[in-house]
Amino acid sequence: MHRVLRVLLFALGLAARPAVAIDPGLVERLAFGESNEKVDAVGVLVASGDERAPSFLQALADGAVQTAGRRVLIVTGDEGFDAVTGEKIRPLPGDREDVVVNNRLRREIDSALGALRLVSPDRGTRLKAAKALEDRADASLLPLVRKALARESDLAIKPLLELIAAAMELASGDRAARLAAVRTLGRSGNPNTKTLLLSLLAKKDGIDPEIRAAAEASLRAVEGRLVWGERLGLAFAGVSLGSILLLAALGLAITYGLMGVINMAHGELIMVGAYTTYVVQNLFRAHAPGAFDAYLACAVPAAFFASALVGMALERSVIRWLYGRPLETLLATWGISLALIQAVRTIFGAANVQVENPVWMSGGVEVLANVVLPWSRIVIVFFASAVLAGMWLLLTRTRLGLFVRGVTQNRAMASCVGVPTARVDTLAFGLGSGVAGLAGCALSQIGNVGPDLGQAYIVDSFMVVVLGGVGQLAGTVYAAFGLGFANKLLESWQGAVLAKIAVLVFIIVFIQRRPQGMFALKGRALES
C-alpha cells in the first residue's frame, strides 16, 4: 500500500511539472552503474535540488525501480511509469529486471532522504533531519545544506545547519573556507564537534598553521561548553537522587522520629506502593486504554492508601505491643518484610514487572548538546517537592500534626492533656507508610518493579534519617539532597562502589561526633 502511494505521488509530481525532468544521465547511472557510480549519482541527484528526487530515491530503496532494456521504470503491481519522463507504460514489458540496491547504496539513500527533508515545509521534519545529518554529514550534500540554510529562518534550526555546513567545509580544499569553518565550529557545544576538531588536529602534516591555531582555539571553546554541560548534568543527577532519597526516607522520618520504631519493613511498604501502581496501570490498560496517560492520577492516591493500610495493620497488630523494645521491634519488622516479599512473589511472581511511563513523562528536554534531562526525573523532583510541602502543611497546620508534634516532644504530658496517643501512633504510622507508598509509585516510573525493590532503599533511608536528625523534617531534606550530591560527585570521580564506601565512612564519623544528627530534637522530656 505504501509503495503504491509513493508511485502515485511520483506520477502526480510529474504530471504537475511536465517541463521538469530528472537528469536522464543520473537515472541511468543509478540503474546500470557500478556500486561507486550509483553512490556518486545519489549525491549529485541530492545536490541538484530536484523536487522529485525524494520520490525516486524512495522508490529505489523500496525496490520499485526496474529496467527494461535501457529504459528505467517505476513499477508497482501492474502499473509502471517512465522514471525520466513520467510517461505511463502500458502494457508493462515482460523482460523487466530489478535494480539491485546493496547495503552501502541503501545507507547512502537513507542519508540522502534525510538531507532532502531539510527543505520540508514542516518545522519538526526539518529539525529532525538536521539533527540526523549532524551525526553523519557527507560533504557531497553541502550544496543542499547551503540551499536549506539560505531558506531557513528558524532560530533553532539555522545555527544547527551552520555547524553542519562548517563540518562539511572542513573537507574542502579552499583554505579560506576551512578557516571560516573551524571558527564556526568553535561556537558549538556538541560532542561530535570536539571529535571533528581532534581528528583535524591529529593530522601531523598538510595543515596550515593558522588553521591549526584556529582549531586549537575552537577546541578549547567547545571543551569549555562541554564541561559546563557535564556540571549541569551532574547537578541534576544529584537533585534527582536526592529527591528519590527524600521520598524513600520521608515516611521513615515520621515513624522512626515519632515512635522510635526501627521499621525494617519500610522498604517493603515502598514495594507495596510500586506494585499498586502496576495494578492500576493494568486496570487502565484493560478497561480504559484511551485514558491510559492519566493512570497516575489514580495510581498516586491508590499507592498511598494501600501502603497506609498495610502500615496501620502492621502497627495495630505487631508494633503497638513492642514499644520501648527496639531489638524485638527490629526482628519482628524484619520478619514481616520477608513475609511481604514472599507474598508479592506468590501473587505477582518472582520476575520483575514493568510500569510504563505515560506519554507526557517519556523522552526528555535537551538543555545543552550533551545534556538531556529525562521528563520522568523532572516530574519526580517536582513530585517530591509537592509531597514535602504537603507533609509540612499537615504537621504544622492541622490538628493531627499538632498531636503528632506533641506526642513527639512529650508523650506522657500529651496523654495527660487528652491527646489519644495510641490513635495518633496508628495514624502517624499510617501516614509514614503512605508516604513510602508514594515513593514506590515514583520509583516505578524510573525502573522495573520487583519483590526486592525496597531492599535497595532501606539502608539509604535510615542513613538519611539518622544523618538529618531523628524526627526532624528539615534535617531529612538536607540529608537527602546532601547525600544525593555527594554520591553523584564521588561517582564521577572514583566510581559508584568507592563513592558508597566514602559516604558510609563519612556518616559513621559524623554520627560519632554528633549523635543527634544535623538537627537535634528538642523538648522538655528530652532535656530532662
Image (cartoon, helix red, strand yellow):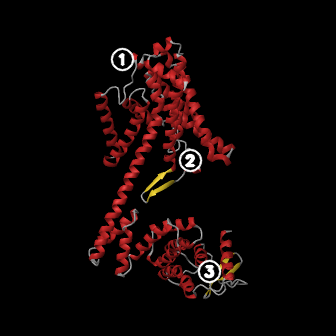
Image marks 1 and 2: residues in contact by CB distance under 8 Å: no
Looking at the rendered structure, the kind of residue marked 3 is: Gln
Q: Quadrant of the N terminus?
A: bottom right
Q: Can the viewer see residue 502 in this picture? A: yes
Tell me: residue 170, above or below residue 263: below
In this rendering, position of residue 5 left or right of residue 205:
right
Distance of mark 3 from mark 2, alpha carbons? Answer: 46 Å
Q: Residue furthest front?
A: 397
Disc number lying in front (3 or 2): 2
Q: Residue furthest top?
A: 416
- First-in-chain label (1 vs 3): 3
Q: Is residue 464 above or below residue 375?
A: above
At label 2, the amino acid type is Asn
- Image coords of residue 71 (percent x, y): 62, 87
Q: CA distance from mark 1 to mark 2?
A: 49 Å
Number of numbered discs present?
3
At x 34%, y 46%, the residue is 489
Q: Where is mark 3, residue-wise?
A: 66
Local secondary structure at mark 1: helix
The residue under the point 59% across, 79% down is: 51
Furthest residue to the right?
90
Characterize the local packing of mark 3: few (<14), some (14-19) or many (20 or more) Cα atoms within 10 angstroms. Answer: many
Residue 32, percent from left and from top: 55, 84
Q: Which quadrant is home to the C terminus?
A: top left
Task: Give the numbered dot on residue 457.
Answer: none
Q: Secondary structure at mark 2?
A: loop
Q: Nearer the viewer, residue 287 or 425?
A: 425
Residue receiving disc 1: 527
Indicate which disc residue 357 carries. Answer: 2
